[in-house]
Image (cartoon, helix red, strand yellow):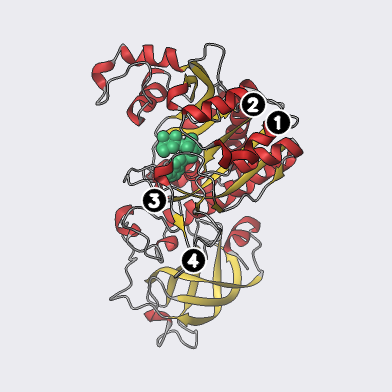
Amino acid sequence: MRIQKILKQQEVEREVKVQGWIRTRRDTGTFSFLEVNDGSCLANLQVIADQNLANYDLEVRKLGAGCSVEIRGKLQESPAKGQEVELASEEITVLGWADPETYPLQKKRHSLEFLRSMSHLRPRTNALGAVTRVRSHLSFAVHRFFQERGFAQIHTPIITTSDCEGAGEMFQVSATGEKSPFFGRPAGLTVSGQLQAEVYAQALGQVYTFGPTFRAENSNTSRHLAEFWMIEPEVAFCDLACNMELATDMLKFLLRDVLTACADDLALFDKFIEKGLLKKLHAVIDNDFVHIPYTRAVEELSAVSGEFEYPVKWGIDLQSEHERYLTEVIYKCPVIVTDYPASIKPFYMRLSEDEKTVAAMDILVPGIGEIVGGSQREERYDVLVQRMTEAGIDTSEYDWYLDLRRYGSVPHSGFGLGFERLVQFVTGMANIREVIPFPRTPGYAPC
Ligand code: ATP
Ligand code: MN
């Protein structure tokens, strides 16, 4: 039986079998306490191992952190503080030993940097186990959010021949020893499923993709990975306002959901990782997001220009320091910045009447900066062709994309939510490498 269920049901007198890993052993004169964790929840199960057990001296007294065991016994009320039930063991089978001389996870708290050097063992720690459960729960909640609203999930390709964002950031894909391109032309790993999601939005109306995304960005920041997961909804008959509403509803839904479902894990983060985390999350749920046009944001930031490494003026792309200043210092809540200069945004964003800005929106949150990037898409054939030409894109490569504007074009919009940035925000983890099981960054991809 899983420990989570045992602690939830608290049925004393019940016979159970538990399997897990020892966290600690403490001996008294006539018996030992074992703390066992099986990963189902943060809490350990306390096990009483009496000296009358057949293997007490030979094995039980040698158990230490990391050993795997199977335990049969009866649940009983615990006299000690801190838990309601404990397991009076009747049989303890050692499944796997862990040499205390070499097992790296001893009882003391290890730094997250140290744990990062062993992505194969770190999920056995409280913090990384909790991150993993929260991440899994959030992933499921993402699907629930969209499925309940009638969105169809689209499995957009991982190997692609169209580079949507920026040519420099792609990983190339080729077959071992290939003589000519396997796909007949250069191919790479996807940097975004958006363009393909647009195809399906203009047939099924409301769609989303949730899959791995690859960017060869050679920047070692606490918010960038070379392989990350992205959630990209795309909605037909939906303008920028509708897009912002969807993103806001989604973020609030996910936070509300995880706060109840993962209460114990979040309490751990609130205590040890980011003080005030729960308050921060509740504030996001309870308050409206601030909406400001880029031009206004630039004015606000110019007034405090001395604060920044990169000076602010109209036309620049906002740097992380600017984004964070807006959301952390000026507004102290999530901020949606809209209407960015066309010159710094991709060709597919819809050109506004001023012909200087596009119908874009980024959502900025405290501690992270940009968590969502989205826009209304250019649905007018002529304008799109002109924007592509200006951007130096060979339109013949995008015939399929232009066809969507030739045949039954509709206003539509969508956004990309970086899943790891969401998990960072929810767990308070300062470094994105903590919230994905096996991070890939420049120079680093061990297992
Ligand atoms: P940034 O300016 O932070 O690099 P971006 O403008 O490149 O972000 P988009 O192309 O709009 O981001 O991608 C949508 C979302 O994907 C971002 O809002 C962010 O949450 C996430 N994201 C982008 N790049 C990465 C990355 N390298 N690692 C993890 N998440 C990322
Ligand atoms: Mn980027």
Labels 1, 4: front one: 1
Residue 254: x and y, percent?
59, 38
Circle number at residue 381: 2
When the figure is inspected, residue 125 is found, relative to residue 156, above or below; the finding is below
> What is the distance, in whole Å, between disc 1 and disc 3 at their CAs?
43 Å
Q: Earlier in the sequence, mark 2 or mark 1?
A: 2
Query: Secondary structure beneath disc 2?
Result: helix
Residue 70: x and y, percent?
54, 77
Circle number at residue 175: 4
Q: Residue at x 52, y 48 (%)?
A: 264
Amino acid at pointer 1: Arg
> What is the distance, in whole Å, between disc 1 and disc 4 at their CAs?
35 Å
Quarter holding the C terminus is: bottom left
- The residue to which callout 3 is attached is 433
Task: Report if the CB atoms under discs 3 and 4 are less than 8 Å apart.
Answer: no
> What is the distance, in whole Å, between disc 2 and disc 4 at their CAs?
36 Å
Residue 278 can be seen in this image: no
Amino acid at pointer 2: Tyr
